Amino acid sequence: MGVFRHLPLLLLLILGTSGVFVRATALLDLPRTVNVSENAPPGMSIAEFIVNCTYLNSNISVTLQSVTPPTAFFNPPTISSSDTVDKGYSIKITLSPAAALDARQVNQYTLVLQAQCPAEELVETQLFVQVRPEDAAPQCMGKFASADGDLVEVPENVAPLLPIYTVILRRPVCGLRFTIEDNNSPFSISSSGQVLAPETGSSLRHHNQFRLQILVTDRRGRNCSGILKVQVLHVHQPRVNFTVPWQAVMVEENTGPMQRITKVSASGNNVRYKIIAPAFHRLYTINPWTGEIHNTYSVDLGQFPKAAHTQLLVQAYDMLHPSDSATMMLNITVLKANVLPPRCSPDVFVAQLPETTPIDRTLMTLTCTDSDVSNSSLHYQVEGDQRSRYIFRMKGHQLQVNATLDYDSESIAAADFQYVATILVTDRRQPPQTTSVSVLVTVTPVNEYPPACPGHSTFSVREDAAFGYVIGFVNGTDWDYPFNSIIYSLIGGAGGSLPAFYIGPHSGRICVLRPLDYERQTTYQLTVKLQDVHNDVDPTFQRSVSCNITINVQTPRKEPLVITRTDYFWEPTPWFMVVLTISSILLLAALGWLAWGLLCWSICREPTQVLLQDRSLPHTDSVKREKGALRDLSKEMDSSSILSLGQFDGRAQDPLTSREYLFNSSTGARRWI
């Protein structure tokens, strides 16, 4: 028994030696909290700890799993052998080159580290880094703080007061004052450190470079400075431009050669003209200095049938700066004798009208003349697509509004809020000659309708709803285009306490902002302000409405507990069942035969034992009773039976079956009665 008493301990030692139990990697000195100044430079070591392994020179793994809140301020851990701990490794955590700690933004970071030695368990722990605020002087950074300074290039036509540079500091500091020392330049600097362009662009046209010495001072008088060099890029201003975008000219047939057809004119310096399309033409030429166009041949439609309609693309350009150019289209139509269409002014009407422009308002008075007919015989008709045709009408030679200029519809939005129509002016001669006047009217928005409160104003939320849980949406409506352009906000509050709910300004989504308590407050009455935006040409003109909503807090509903039980059963093959059945039958038969043999053996043995026991008794009453019973039995039997029973001298009862039998005390023979 002494050997077996120590058997569990022996097995434990064997299993431990064979490596069944895995030792956990030991991380010393963690978790813990370290303090770091917000002025700590990149690359600085902020924490060092020891990882202890079972074996030395093993391939240890230490990783930085996550940082909360997420940031890239920390480098991956560095691993080196420890000089103080046997079989240990020194792990260092350092700041990354992007580190810019600011205690006003985040005052603590939580680093989750994982370490593992070979054949050992993975261990996870935490390192808490607390950022300590420091009242440090402003620090200028980058090329701005170098001896040469920083360089920025600015075109001479830069927009007035446009920020062109921002002073680079190591970290934001409140209450700084930015000044440009000995500032003789047209540049200025804002309170946030942005260098602004001059108020007038003309102040840069005669300068190549400016050197700005910028001083940054805090409230305690501590400062830093830097140099900014501004390189002025001279830009040639495009000045060539045609006075009209296109021109139509009518030329009578049989006009002699080298006659002046028309003259094009463009504004600008050193302007020259040329015909650039079509590339090969023979009928017309242009004077490059004056822009006059002449015909080179006599205009004869019989000889030149294609001369009936000629389209020339004329270019005007600055001779000293050829890239400064403009083009216009010139349509030359050769009319047969006594065939002239009406000529109208203006030939194009472009306007912007608010959507509330009243019907019957006169937009334009069209002046048309025709040298072949009197002006009273001209016919005016408005043509256009299905949307624009009935928006305008002609009353005599006046263009008027015929229907509402609706801005609040998807159809007009698909057309960029423009109505495009054409006024056809036709004379009464045969064949009729027609002149078209293009009409382009852009509709501007007017904020006509205030927002409308939603129909659904009651919401429910469980008291155990988590932070940010979405309760529902406040779906306001606004009939001004763009439709439902609404900003949502909650009106009022609970003083200095944290509000219980938050509403998304653009989505109208109501979210849980702090824990709810059904026992303290079951109902919240909130007032939501709906304010429309982007519905008027004046962005400052907005309409708003206040809507009341109710939020009911509920007792969390208990979820039913579902328990799943899996039953396993064994399904043998058919041949196995056959073998099992035959074997069971044989086993039962063998057991029955064995039981029968034992029963018979016990029956054969028991009478003899009972008889021997009776004979061994000192009393003779039982013998007498047995003999009396035999005599009574012999009386009841015939002589043959009596003779046959003469060999039995005793009578007994079977203890198992309670049956009586006769027995011979000498031979042991017996017989059931």
Image: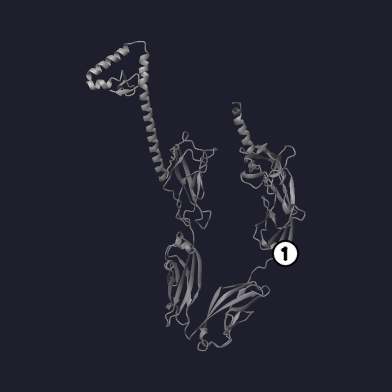
- 525 or 398, nearer to the observer: 525
Q: Residue 207's spot in the image, x, y percent? A: 73, 63
Q: Residue 90's spot in the image, x, y percent? A: 71, 41
Q: Residue 560's spot in the image, x, y percent? A: 43, 38
Please give the count of numbered marks on the rendered protein: 1
- 2 or 538, nearer to the observer: 2
- Residue 374 higher or lower than 463, as above or below: below
Quarter of the image for the N terminus: give it: top right
Residue 590's quadrant in the figure?
top left
- Quick one: which residue is furthest to the right in this view? 147
The residue where tag 1 is placed is 206
Q: Secondary structure at mark 1?
A: loop
Residue located 43% across and 70% down the image: 394
Quarter of the image for the C terminus: give it: top left
The answer to whether 512 appears left or right of 49 in the picture is left
- Residue 416 higher or lower than 326, as above or below: above
Disc 1: CA contacts within 10 A as few (<14), some (14-19) or many (>=20): few
Q: Amino acid at mark 1?
A: His
- Residue 23 appears in the picture as rendered: no
The answer to whether 573 appears left or right of 19 in the picture is left
Q: Residue 200's spot in the image, x, y percent? A: 66, 60
